[in-house]
Image (cartoon, rainbow, N blue to C red):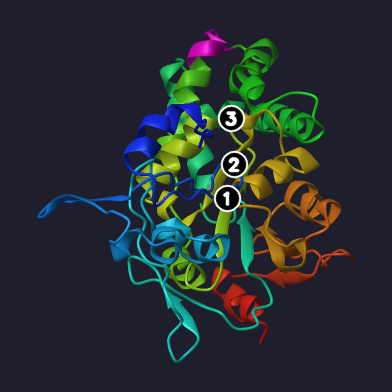
Amino acid sequence: MEEVSRDSTKAEQDQHPEPHWQIDAPREELHVLGPCVLKDEDEGDHRGDATDDRTRPDTALVALATRVLVRHVMPPYRLGDRIPPTPQPDENGTVAGTLGVTRPLGNMRYTTLLFDLDHTLIDGDASEGAAFDYTLRRSGADDPADYLAPYVEINTALWAAVEAGEITPNDVRSERFARLIAATDLESDPETMGDDFVFGMGANGELYPGTVETLDSLAQMATLALVTNGIGEVQRARLARLDLDKYFDAIVISGEVGVAKPGPEIYDLTFEELGHPDKATTLMIGDSLSSDMAGGTNYGIATCWYAARSDKATPAGIDHRITALDELLPIIAGE
């Protein structure tokens, strides 16, 4: 949120000299200036004054610790909005969010979880297979399988270049098809193929079994963020279609920000979005050794390898290994 200058609020301050509070915090934090307004569909706007209990600082402002606990289920606030009172822990040591979500305040091992998307939460193979078939048939191929082997080789090399910081995911969009056309007898337009493939990727692929249930549980235990190497249009379409947006306090997509895992810059952006959580209690979860595990390790945070598709031994330096998402629950809780 942009800072509001002292001059821009002078008229409001003159009209309501008290109360006037401001939190100096990162841009995603809340700045509340002047009287707070609660907008209620049934009761209309309620403007507090200096004697109104609703405008006291302890009921009007949400501190950083509370935002970390409940921000992902709270609606966005703007200048003049009244922020709900700070929730208090119950006898079990939990804090209730605005939609009934509770998070333990006890000694959790990890309180911030960074998730990969493809092959971790969503079946990326099914998504890519359906998108490839759709794209090749629209390009006139009778049997898309005939072109699969060269496509895989080309696509793998391009995504390795993304991880190396040589190109961006947006470059992959049409370049993989330009190279495929050059290497085969396909007669098509790479830009059109790229558009068709992006549509197909966003429209196909389902969550792995148990993903929703696990995220529901984890959202009560920790702050969740999504850090994914991909094209923005693809990932945003999937998140909307599968109703995943609601789980994450930050969604950082390499194609939108211009940097990718395993580089540290994408983690810097994620930590900024989250309000700079403690690295000691942050965990990166993903399937890729070269991007997720290497990126987390190099950034100084713990890693959890989702190895459901691999029978390789766990490389040194990885903190945890799981083959099903629900195995995360005891790890997060420190059991």
Identify the mark nearer the N-term, 2 or 1: 1
Q: Amino acid at mark 2?
A: Val
Out of 318 and 153, give the one closest to the viewer: 318
Span of residues in magenta: 186-192
- Give the quadrant of residue 199: top left
Q: Which amino acid, by three-letter code, is at mark 1?
A: Leu
Q: How many marks?
A: 3
What amino acid type should be assigned to the residue bearing mark 3?
Glu
C-alpha distance separating marks 3 and 1: 13 Å
322 with respect to 212 (left or right): right
Q: Residue at x 35, y 62 (%)?
A: 84
Cα distance, mark 2 to mark 1? 6 Å
Looking at the rendered structure, the secondary structure element under dot 1 is strand
**Does residue 169 lie above or below 68 as drawn?**
above
Q: Earlier in the sequence, mark 3 or mark 1?
A: 1
Estimate how packed mark 1 is, as few (under 14), some (14 to 19) or many (20 or more) residues with alpha carbons within 10 Å: many
Mark 2 touching mark 1, by CB under 8 A?
Answer: yes
User: Residue 229: horizontal and vertical position, in percent?
Assistant: 64, 39
Q: Residue at x 34, y 72 (%)?
A: 100
Q: Of helix, strand and loop, which one carries label 3?
A: helix
The residue depicted at 71 percent of the width and 68 percent of the height is 281
Which residue has dot 2 on it?
A: 252
Mark 2 secondary-structure assignment:
strand
Structural crowding at the residue carrying mark 2, measured as other residues with C-alpha within 10 Å and reported as few (<14), some (14–19) or many (≥20): many
Instruction: Give the answer, above or below, for where 34 lies relative to 201.
Output: below
Residue 107 sits in quarter: bottom right
Which disc number belongs to residue 226? 1
Q: Are marks 2 and 3 in contact (CB under 8 Å)?
A: yes
Which label number is shown at residue 256?
A: 3
Q: Nearer the viewer, residue 131 or 18?
A: 18
